[in-house]
Amino acid sequence: MPAQILVVEDEPAIQELIALNLEQAGQRPVMASSAEQALERIQEALPDLVLLDWMLPGQSGLELARRLRGDARTKKLPIIMLTARGDEEDKLRGLETGADDYITKPFSVKELQARIKAVLRRRAPEITDDAVEYHGLRLDPASHRITGKGKDLAMGPTEFRLLHFFMTHPERVYSRTQLLDQVWGDHVFIEERTVDVHIRRLRSALEKSGHHAFIQTIRGSGYRFSRA
Ligand code: CA
């Protein structure tokens, strides 16, 4: 699943450079030239990560970061601050505000990708391209392949995303609402029983290798992915 990255940057040349680079890395960039525009974009759909320029016309990047951290919906949104300022005190201020990381301009595209990947891996491992393994089950997002004990397992795109989420968040119980938020995405309104339909399909896709038992129903709570 490509990560949707909101780029908040007022300089067109830098905006374009970042957008091009993100697209080449298989990510989906969404652009905003000001904090106000960024809030509009976030209102439309919650991105997976925000690349936020410190110096913006109007409200600064720092103020926007503070605002995002103060809102329940965006509290956990990963933020990487971009800035021309190199000094340590500014860096600390940025991190105190709640930015996950900090990149000083000028930066190389390689550095940008490395930071994005590191933050996504930490905050949302299900949207990186890293292959995941769990007790004989292997899911590779890059090739879109799933194998269980060496056997190829076929499943639909929703089941794939659901399994990817489970495999990157094992041993925890998720309610249907949480799964809808995490797997189907924000601002998508689907009935909770849709989750049950896809759980059923996922279980049947995993039967071939015996991994269906890992998808556990926790009565009154939801579902858990676990070996035990
Ligand atoms: Ca700027």
Image (cartoon, helix red, strand yellow):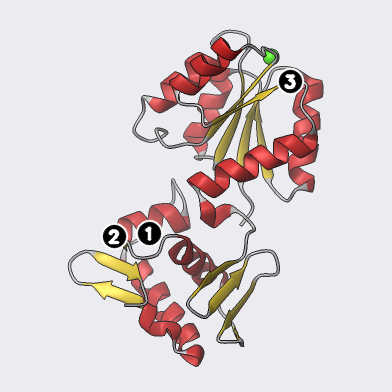
Q: Nearer the viewer, mark 3 or mark 2?
A: 3
Nearer the observer, 78 or 158: 78
Q: Amino acid at mark 1?
A: Leu
Marks 2 and 3: in contact by CB < 8 Å? no
Label 1 near label 2: C-beta < 8 Å? Answer: yes
Q: Which residue is mark 2?
A: 175
Position in image of residue 223 (x %, y %) = 31, 68
When the figure is inspected, residue 201 is found, relative to residue 100, above or below; the finding is below
Element at label 1: helix
Q: Which residue is mark 1?
A: 179
Q: Which mark is residue 105?
A: 3
Q: Is residue 217 left or right of residue 88?
A: left
Identity of the amino acid at label 3?
Answer: Lys
* Cα distance between the residues tagged 3 and 1: 38 Å
Residue farthest to the left, as pictured: 220
Judged from this view, the residue extending furthest toward the front is 88
| N-terminal label among 3 and 2 | 3
Which image quadrant shows ligand 1? top right
For this orientation, the residue located farthest to the top is 58
Q: State the quadrant of the C terminus.
A: bottom left
Task: Calculate the distance from the C-alpha at mark 2 to the C-alpha at mark 1.
Answer: 6 Å
